[in-house]
Image (cartoon, rainbow, N blue to C red):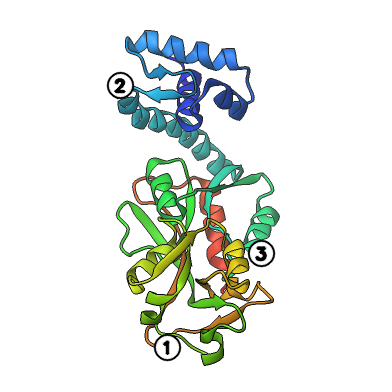
Amino acid sequence: MELRQIEYFLACCDHSTFTAAARSLNVVQSAVSTGVAKLEREIGERLFDRTPTVLVLTDVGRAVVGPAREAVRARADIFDAVDGVRGDIHGEVVVGALVNVTSIALAEAFAEVHRRHPGITIAMRQNPRGSSGNVVGVRSGILDLAFLGSHPDPTPGLVVHRLAQEPLVLVCARDHRFAVAGSFRTTDLADERTIDHPPGWGTRALVDREVPMRRTAIEVADQTFGMSLAVKGFGVTLVPLGVARTEPDAAIVPCSDKSLVWDIAIAHSSERTPSNAARAVLSAVLEFARPV
């Protein structure tokens, strides 16, 4: 069994087709399909069911994913240990991102990583399920680090470092009754068309918890578009204050009956030691990603 075959298998798990897996590894498609077939012959079981459109993991394939990721990580850990002794910190750090991070100076932190360790590359990954998807990514080993927004504490399997907090505010049209009043109560949203974000997002979790009685008119995976709808009178939306300030036409309205606080954190696995490169990125974020 060759480690390269295991890498091909994992790429197929992550991308669902031989073609997409090959593209991610910068190899030809035939190399991936042949490598997976050889791995299946050595194991004596099929790892994927080949459908006309995607690869679907079999029961055996699902059982193999965890040990396969551990094998790949073990090799990386060996080289990482050697590089650490040499004082040479380099490699890719995969980071789970969040949309519209305005509450911390993230660009300053990443620029500092480049100044200190030009051999480090940072790969930002956006999960459609937001913070919840990032938690899954860290636990599975797909992500080295991940940003979380308003995620519950404690989070099993993760080490979480809090970075910043800011209020969640309501954005609406300037002639809306909330804008005229200058504030709103969470109970007021029971009769308002609300522009929500997808399940799994930190803002959605916070709003579900604190404003359960509301009338959702639409779900959008883009806070900027949601605010554009709000200022046009489509409805109202709840976003972090820093995000709200990026919409020049928005009326920004605070909550008067509850403390709606959105926080941002960065996390890594508590089950695995981060690589030297991941620790360097984490250190820079904690040092330079100051609250804005």
Labels 3 & 1 near each other (Cβ < 8 A): no
> In percent of the image, x 41 and y 32: which residue is there?
69
Judge from the rendering whether residue 118 lies leftward or rightward of residue 173; answer left or right: right
Between marks 2 and 3 in the image, the one whose residue lies nearer the viewer = 2
State which quadrant residue 70 falls in.
Answer: top left
Labels 2 & 3 near each other (Cβ < 8 A): no
Image location (x, y in percent) of residue 63? 30, 27
> Mark 1 or mark 2, which has the lower sequence index?
2
Image location (x, y in percent) of residue 234? 56, 69
Image location (x, y in percent) of residue 28? 63, 17
Residue 108's tag is: 3
How many residues crowd around disc 2 within 10 Å: few (fewer than 14), some, or many (20 or more)?
few
> In percent of the image, x 55 and y 76: which residue is there?
171
- Amino acid type assigned to the residue bearing label 2 in the image: Val
State which quadrant residue 30 falls in.
Answer: top right
Measure the C-alpha gap from mark 2 to mark 3: 45 Å
- Amino acid type assigned to the residue bearing label 1 in the image: Ser
List the residue tagged with mark 2.
Answer: 60
> In percent of the image, x 45 and y 29: which residue is there?
13
